[in-house]
Amino acid sequence: MLDLKNINKSWTLFLDRDGVINHDKDNDYIRDWNEFRFYDTTLEAMAILSKYFERIVVTTNQKGVGKGLMSLADLTNIHSNMLSAIEKTGGKIDKVYYCADLADDSPNRKPNPGMAFQAKNDFEEIELSKSIIVGNRISDMGFGRNAGMYTVFLATTHPETPYPDPLIDLRFTDLLAFAKAI
């Protein structure tokens, strides 16, 4: 069971993007920076979380790129603007991992753990047993379990998701509620 009192700088935070950091588009994709809207409390939450976690990474499924609905340049622009805004308000994200693959069985497409293994390869100090994924979908929770990490579900877009659930360690209303709980 995840005890938030145990978290210190040796832990790693994995964050989903859409529905966690920014507003999700219902049955569509955030295609460019003009469509990206932070939740009102995200920047405050990121500043808090950056004090507790040595590494913070984003892992995001981005089929919109694979489908040709947006370009890799669009996605890179979204992420560079997102990182800049978070850094300007005292937060940080060390790296963004994305999966544009269309096949649901891609090793990098959540709930498969490929992006977690990429992060561990890039940052050898990451211990997946001392890592948390924060997401708004059961696929995020499956990703966490498949990678051997703890899971935190945010009820931002799917509040009807049952809890307790064997895939979910903790549940919060939004990222700021999670940050304040630490």
Image (tube, grey):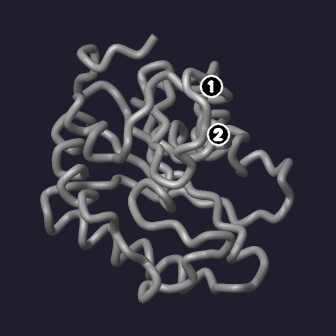
Identify the residue at the far top of this view. Answer: 1
Identify the image quadrant of residue 33.
Answer: bottom left
Q: Residue 139: x, y in percent?
A: 67, 42
Task: Depth check: give the residue in front, 114 or 19.
Answer: 19
Residue 138 is marked as 2
Residue 140 is marked as none
The local secondary structure at tag 1 comes to loop
Q: Residue at x 62, y 75 (%)?
A: 29
- In the rendered image, which residue does mark 1 sit on? 167
Q: Residue at x 60, y 38 (%)?
A: 161
Q: Is residue 163 left or right of residue 15?
A: right
The amino acid type, in three-letter code, at marker 2 is Ile
Q: Residue 162: x, y in percent?
A: 61, 31
Dot 1 and dot 2 residues touching (CB under 8 Å): yes
Task: Depth check: give the residue in front, 100 or 37.
Answer: 37
Q: Residue 106: x, y in percent?
A: 81, 51
The local secondary structure at tag 2 comes to helix
Identify the image quadrant of residue 52.
Answer: top left
Q: Against 114, is 152 above or below?
A: above
Task: Depth check: give the residue in front, 158 or 124.
Answer: 158
Q: Residue at x 44, y 82 (%)?
A: 77
Q: Residues within 10 Å of mark 2 (few under 14, many from 20)?
A: some
The amino acid type, in three-letter code, at marker 1 is Leu
